[in-house]
Structures are given as C-alpha cells and as structure tokens.
Image (cartoon, helix red, strand yellow):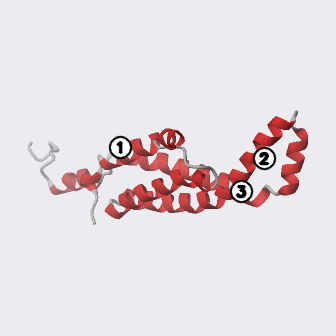
Amino acid sequence: MSESISNFDNQENSNLMYDEKPILLKVLCILSWIGSGIQIFSSTIYSLFINETVKQEFFALLPNKEVVDMYEKLFVLLDSTSIWYLILYLINFAVVHMMWNFKLNGFYGYIFTQILILLVPFIVNPLSISQLAVSSIFPIIFIFLYGLNLKYFKN
C-alpha cells in the first residue's frame, strides 16, 4: 500500500522540484527576450532601410514645417542611436540567457546593459534628469524582480 502512494521523499520527485525554473524567472526572461527582440528587429530594419531618400519622401507627406522639424530631430536621434541599441539589446539578449541558466554574471551584465541602454539617448540630447527618471522605471522594476531570483543563481 505504501509503495503506490507517491511522496516527495524519493529521489526522482525531489530532483524534479529543484530542476524547475521559478515561474517569476521564466516570465521575466521571456518578457525581456520579447522586448529585446522587438528592439533588435526595429533597429535592424531602421539601419537597413531608412536612408535619406526615404526620409525626404516621408517629409514630403507631412502637412507643415513644424511637423517636418519634429521628425527631422527624431531621425537625427534614430540615426545616432539605432546601432547602439542593436548592439546593447543583443548583449541584453545574451545576459538574459545567462540568467535563464542561473548564472550570477548574467544578473550583473543585465544591470550594466540596462544602465547603458538608459544613457544611449543622451548621446545626442543633453542629459535630462526627468527623462532619465521616467525611462528608468521599468528597468528598475525588472532589476528588482530579477534580484528576487538571486538565491537560485550560481557563480
């Protein structure tokens, strides 16, 4: 009778419990990969297909000079930052993979990469503390939530 009842004391069941990734870590990694993938895709598309001809055709469609000026500033920002974002989000993808595999260096790499990603827009624009504060909300939340999983990470 006692052999037919499953319990958690036997070795096979206990190994399953310890090999399983925490749900929070799974969700965070998947969300990070989705966000990185979208940014990698958009940065790649921008770098490959948006040139001066495309910009001029786009400007011709706009209704007035103020809107054209606004988009010219946006294109200057995108021209200056798209390659940086592409590189940093590729690194981000890799460090999230490290955290998926319970590597502590992945967590530290994630923090460093997120700080660099936050600073990229300031390559072109002057540093704005309010813009930096607003931009850092989600990275801080993700770093905190990843930090809740540190007990599972190994060196």
> Which quadrant would the C terminus be assigned to in this image?
bottom left
Q: Quadrant of residue 15?
A: bottom left
Give the alpha-carbon distance from disc 3 to disc 2, as whole Å: 10 Å
Q: In the rendered structure, which amino acid carries the disc numbered 3? A: Asp
Q: Which residue is mark 3?
A: 79
Q: Secondary structure at mark 2?
A: helix
Q: Which residue is mark 2?
A: 72
Q: Which residue is mark 1?
A: 24
Q: In the rendered structure, which amino acid carries the disc numbered 2? A: Glu
7 left or right, relative to 79: left
Neighbours of disc 2 within 10 Å: few (<14), some (14-19), many (20+): some
Q: In the rendered structure, which amino acid carries the disc numbered 1? A: Leu
* Residue 50 locus on image (x, y percent): 79, 55
Give the alpha-carbon distance from disc 3 to disc 1, as whole Å: 36 Å
* Residue 33 locus on image (x, y percent): 51, 52
Q: Is residue 146 above or below residue 108?
A: above
